[in-house]
């Protein structure tokens, strides 16, 4: 039976009401408070380093690390009418394109590159030796409609975090959308396993998190870091990721073994939809570590700007 933790219950043992927050939650809260304090210190430094890196000429981004932006700009230039009798402004066009890409590109300091490369290689090995085989087996056993329902369920469970972050960013329309989606999917969608809010009402999901909220309040990225199992992140996004967990009801499921099993199901189910994409990404990159870092940073920047 799924039990939700109570301030007066500690891992199966009743304790006096004055005991306060459960030990696990207290530890997580302490870690969260430490990281919040830490990000305040490193954010300014990270911003300064990022600005310094922006003025550097020796670390320009490889074009293949942001192919979509480069493709759009190249297409736009290709569609520009050409005058055969005029001088070919090739150099000028390329200068404009290079300037646009330079202005659009976001850089984040990477002082922990040796550690990050090590963790990248660890995660790479874990993917090929553990994640991919498990996800392939899972995909072969669980039919796609069931996997879609499980994905919808976990997405619906994350509504509180997205709703709160929409409010913190003063995105009231997005908050209203998230609330309506939650009510419709929890009821008509049977606890969120269905998504009638999108299928029948056209309410598209909103992607907001604490990392984006911190960015809107002026907190810089800090620096880039790769976590084992979790993958690429920054100091700001790491704090946001942990903070969002306190608004996820599945965080409070007990016993611990069941909570771990739920998390494993969530990530295995998600991986079953992504099999093969990492291989394509890695094969197309000259340096997969750099490609992953720059792709992640630009992706997060796009989320914040939207």
Image (cartoon, rainbow, N blue to C red):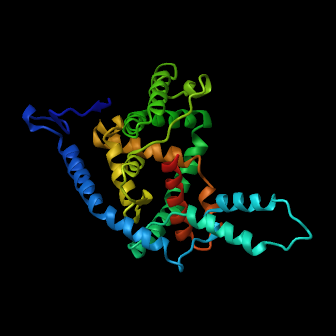
Q: Quadrant of residue 221?
A: bottom left
Is residue 259 toward the left or the right of residue 73 in the image?
left
Is residue 177 toward the left or the right of residue 22 in the image?
right
Which residue occupies the foreground of this view, 88 or 154?
Answer: 88
Residue 151 lies, in percent from the top left, at 52, 37
Res. 199 in view: yes
Q: Quadrant of residue 166?
A: top left
Res. 109 in view: no
Quadrant of the frame with the N terminus? top left
Residue 44 lies, in percent from the top left, at 32, 64
Which residue occupies the foreground of this view, 184 or 76?
Answer: 76
Seen as rendered, the residue at the extreme bottom is 58
Residue 88 lies, in percent from the top left, at 83, 73
Residue sitting at x 24%, y 34%: 5
Seen as rendered, the residue at the extreme right is 85
Residue sitting at x 34%, y 34%: 249
Residue sitting at x 75%, y 58%: 76
Seen as rendered, the residue at the extreme front is 86
Is residue 300 toward the left or the right of residue 227 in the image?
right
Residue sitting at x 49%, y 54%: 300
Is residue 79 toward the left or the right of residue 33 in the image?
right
Q: Quadrant of residue 279?
A: bottom right
Which residue occupies the foreground of this view, 182 or 51?
Answer: 51
């Amino acid at each position: 039976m799924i039990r939700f933790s109570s301030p007066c219950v500690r891992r199966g043992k009743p304790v006096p009401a004055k005991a306060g927050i459960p030990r696990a939650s207290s530890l997580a809260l302490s870690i969260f408070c430490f990281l919040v304090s830490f990000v305040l210190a490193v954010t300014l430094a990270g911003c300064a380093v990022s600005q310094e890196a922006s003025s550097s000429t020796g670390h320009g981004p490889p074009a293949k690390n942001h192919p979509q932006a480069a493709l759009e700009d190249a297409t736009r230039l290709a569609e520009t009418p050409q005058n055969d009798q005029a001088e070919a402004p090739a150099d000028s066009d390329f200068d404009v394109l290079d300037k646009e890409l330079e202005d659009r590109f976001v850089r984040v300091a990477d002082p922990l590159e040796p550690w990050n490369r090590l963790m990248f290689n660890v995660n790479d090995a874990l993917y090929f030796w553990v994640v991919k085989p498990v996800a392939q087996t899972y995909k072969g056993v669980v039919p796609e409609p069931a996997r879609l329902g499980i994905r919808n369920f976990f997405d619906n469970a994350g509504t509180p975090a997205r709703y709160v972050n929409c409010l913190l960013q003063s995105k009231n329309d997005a908050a209203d959308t998230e609330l309506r989606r939650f009510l419709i999917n929890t009821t008509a969608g049977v606890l969120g396993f269905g998504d009638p809010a999108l299928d029948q009402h056209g309410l598209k999901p909103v992607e907001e998190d604490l990392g984006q909220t911190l960015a809107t309040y002026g907190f810089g990225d800090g620096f880039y870091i790769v976590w084992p199992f979790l993958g690429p992140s920054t100091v700001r996004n790491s704090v946001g990721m942990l903070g969002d967990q306190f608004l996820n009801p599945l965080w409070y499921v007990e016993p611990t073994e069941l909570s771990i099993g739920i998390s494993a199901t969530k990530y295995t189910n998600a991986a079953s939809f992504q099999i093969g994409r990492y291989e394509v990404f890695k094969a197309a990159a000259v340096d997969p570590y750099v490609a992953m870092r720059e792709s992640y940073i630009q992706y997060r920047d796009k989320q914040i700007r939207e």
